[in-house]
Amino acid sequence: MRVLALGATELKLLWRNRSVMVMAIVFPLGLGGYMAYQGTSFGGGGWGVVVTLQIMLVLLMTVYITITTTLTARRQDLFLKRLRSGELTDFGVLAGTVGPVLALGFAQSLVLTIIAISAGAPIPNNPLLFAVGVLVGLALFAAAGMASTVFTKTPENAQITTLPVFMVAAGAATSSFLADSQTVHWISVALPGGGIAELLRTGWLGTTWDGRAVGFADQFLAAGPAVGASAVWSVIAVYAALRWFRWEPRA
């Protein structure tokens, strides 16, 4: 119950912060909605690109950047330190602080999926694989957000410190389905974010990276390397967050 109470308080704080609202809510939904209604210009296969980019926007902006900014702000005003002196465990403090952002990211992913379908996109060919991509992406970028606080001194600095991961993940996601060679494609999948994009695209279209349609079971086999790469990056991010996360302001 204390974790839920903390989560409710955190959600109110996020809602009252205008800059966070724009970054975590208005921009991803606005741009994602616009992309959906431009999806027909990409052709049938283009819907996989559109939906993948929609979800990646949510993962990077709503989840990754917001978690980095929020945890840094709560650390700077000693909020995390005060919570640790109470009855909540360290896990409870983090769950109550990060949980609302993850719930918001999941809700936005669902809304954007519905918007895409209402704009003419086909339903996902493999909903289970698509859902795995969303959930693994939430876990990966939540852990990455926690890890990024290690070298983020103030909330204002988060716009700079999150830029490298943002650019690498966005670039890997884009090149994973635009690559014209197998080597470039798999390099993209091996980078943070590229594997998530591969899972989302394969789950939505039911095709391999070169457009070849495969059966339901073979889709999971084709997505195996993407799952493996995303799992490795998730483990690295979680380890970094648990190993070096700071509860008090940096000197």
Image (tube, helix red, strand yellow):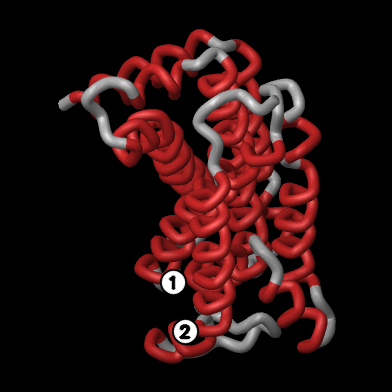
Please report the residue visible at 27 percent of the width from the left and 21 percent of the height from the top: 86
Q: Is residue 28 above or below residue 232?
A: above
Q: Which residue occupies the foreground of this view, 208 or 166? A: 166
Q: In the rendered structure, are the residues bearing label 1 and label 2 in contact, judged by CB atoms less than 8 Å apart?
A: yes
Q: Is residue 32 above or below residue 75?
A: below
Amino acid type assigned to the residue bearing label 1 in the image = Asn
**Residue corresponding to mark 2:** 219
1 vs 2, front mark: 2
Is residue 136 visible to us here?
A: yes
Place of residue 230 in the rendered image (x, y in percent of width and height, measured from the top left): 55, 69
Q: Which residue occupies the foreground of this view, 233 or 171? A: 233
Q: Which mark is residue 242?
A: none
Distance between mark 1 and mark 2 Cα atoms: 10 Å
Question: How many circles with numbers are drawn on the protein?
Answer: 2
Place of residue 18 in the rendered image (x, y in percent of width and height, measured from the top left): 60, 11
Is residue 205 visible to us here?
A: no
Left or right: residue 246 versus residue 94 is: right
Quadrant of the image occupied by residue 36: top right
Mark 1 Cα-neighbour bin, 10 Å: few <14, some 14–19, many ≥20 = some
Q: Which residue occupies the foreground of this view, 198 or 210? A: 198
Place of residue 43 in the rendered image (x, y in percent of width and height, measured from the top left): 69, 63
Q: Which mark is residue 125?
A: 1
